[in-house]
């Protein structure tokens, strides 16, 4: 049994235009100790997925269908009290706004002790202090700074303090939603590598949500590529960033500079993702896809397996011969570019 099993999950928001289908039939699993990346353009449902997993959807958001099993228990059917216990104890979220989640009137140490007391009321002071020292060492914060107030910390240090706070609670799963957006590149790298190191020692699983493909390529074992509320492709990071079989992944991959290549076009996929209150039928990427045909706009794409990769595309068989050779050329992804593929 995987640590987390998400099956056919639908998370919708009520809106004046009808339900916004932010997550629409998403399935994937996370094993203990594994790091999984969720990538996709802004608005594809990544944060909604994280919020649903941890149970902090806004008032107009709801789980419309599917299941989220954590250690075999279905979170969607669990009473709120049990769910709250799981939050932080077992699943912790490092959110985009984590830096601002610290209380300005208490020292960092007081806040971490409070979190420990709330979750492990029986833990003695000595053990608590040992855990805090260890967590500070792991995230690269000086132990002497534990008695500082949040305003004495830089943005990056506050984020490290939040990560330290989630680590002292020893969760089985850390959800990191754009964990490093506010940090400079060198710090991002350091922090994610440290988290990876911690995971190896403690078998903590992590789900990293980001639109930065480079972050995911460096730190994740497996990657789920989301497009317009759905999974477009899923598999080991080396294949997703090496030889993907979904046109969207190829476009996304070509949109990020490859440091190994001296000169290359930087691709921008023309057009926009569809409106999720009224998603198109068939493949949601069809409108922007150079391989798209009539069938793509009418029939849901089939699941196609290539080794350990799971992709959803009517034309996965044409990726190797037709799209891959031209995927790094910007003109391939211009709006309305079509490769003249036929359905027969
Ligand atoms: N409270 C809300 N009410 C209605 N619609 C919402 C709400 N929150 C998000 N949405 C919509 O749900 C869809 C998915 O949004 P979500 O924030 O999950 O995407 P995302 O991939 O995390 O984007 P980003 O990378 O910008 O954070 C979008 O169409 C968004 O407009």
Image (cartoon, rainbow, N blue to C red):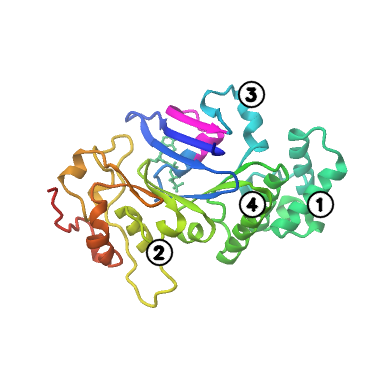
Question: Would you say residue 249 is visible in this rendering?
Answer: yes
Mark 1–mark 2 distance (CA, rounded to whole Å): 41 Å
Whether pointer 4 and pointer 3 mark residues with C-beta atoms closer than 8 Å, the reply is no
Please, is residue 48 above or below residue 193 in the view? above
Question: Which residues make up the magenta segment?
Answer: 50-70
Indicate yes or no: mark 2 CB to ligand 1 under 8 Å: no
Mark 2–mark 3 distance (CA, rounded to whole Å): 43 Å
Q: Which is more N-terminal, label 3 or label 1?
A: 3
Q: Report x, y in % for residue 253.
A: 38, 60
Mark 1–mark 4 distance (CA, rounded to whole Å): 27 Å
Residue 14: name its quadrant. Answer: top left
Q: Which is more N-terminal, label 3 or label 4?
A: 3
Crowding at mark 2 (Cα within 10 Å: few <14, some 14-19, many 20+)? some
Task: Identify the residue under disc 2.
Answer: 256
Mark 2–mark 4 distance (CA, rounded to whole Å): 27 Å
Task: Identify the residue under disc 3.
Answer: 81
Whether pointer 1 and pointer 3 mark residues with C-beta atoms closer than 8 Å, the reply is no
What residue is shown at x 43% (from left), y 74% (from top)?
Answer: 260
């Amino acid at each position: 049994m995987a640590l987390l099993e998400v099956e056919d999950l639908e998370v919708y928001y009520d809106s004046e235009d009808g339900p916004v289908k932010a997550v629409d039939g998403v399935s994937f699993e996370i094993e203990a100790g594994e790091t999984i990346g969720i990538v996709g353009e802004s608005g594809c449902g990544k944060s909604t997925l994280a919020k649903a997993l941890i149970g902090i959807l806004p008032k107009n958001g709801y789980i419309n269908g599917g299941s989220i099993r954590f250690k075999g228990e279905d979170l969607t059917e669990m009473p709120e009290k049990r769910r709250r216990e799981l939050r932080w104890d077992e699943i912790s979220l490092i959110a985009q706004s984590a830096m601002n989640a610290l209380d300005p009137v208490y020292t960092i140490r007081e806040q971490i002790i409070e979190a420990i007391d709330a979750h492990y009321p029986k833990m003695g002071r000595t053990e608590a202090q040992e855990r805090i020292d260890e967590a500070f060492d792991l995230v690269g914060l000086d132990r002497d700074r534990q008695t500082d107030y949040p305003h004495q910390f830089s943005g990056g240090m506050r984020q490290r303090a939040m990560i330290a706070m989630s680590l002292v609670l020893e969760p089985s799963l850390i959800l990191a939603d754009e964990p490093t957006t506010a940090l400079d590149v060198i710090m991002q790298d350091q922090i994610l590598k440290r988290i990876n190191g911690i995971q190896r020692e403690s078998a903590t699983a992590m789900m990293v949500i980001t639109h930065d493909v480079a972050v995911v390529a460096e730190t994740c074992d497996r990657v789920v590529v989301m497009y317009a509320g759905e999974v477009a492709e899923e598999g080991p990071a080396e294949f997703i960033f090496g030889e993907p079989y979904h046109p969207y992944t190829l476009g996304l991959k070509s949109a990020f500079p490859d440091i190994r290549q001296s000169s290359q076009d930087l691709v921008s996929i023309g057009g926009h993702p569809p409106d999720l209150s009224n998603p198109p039928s068939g493949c949601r990427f069809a409108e922007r896809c150079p391989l798209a045909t009539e069938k793509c706009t009418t029939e849901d794409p089939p699941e196609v397996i290539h080794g350990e990769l799971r992709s959803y595309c009517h034309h996965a068989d044409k990726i190797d011969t037709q799209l891959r050779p031209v995927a790094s050329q910007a003109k391939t992804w211009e709006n309305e570019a079509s490769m003249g593929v036929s359905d027969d």
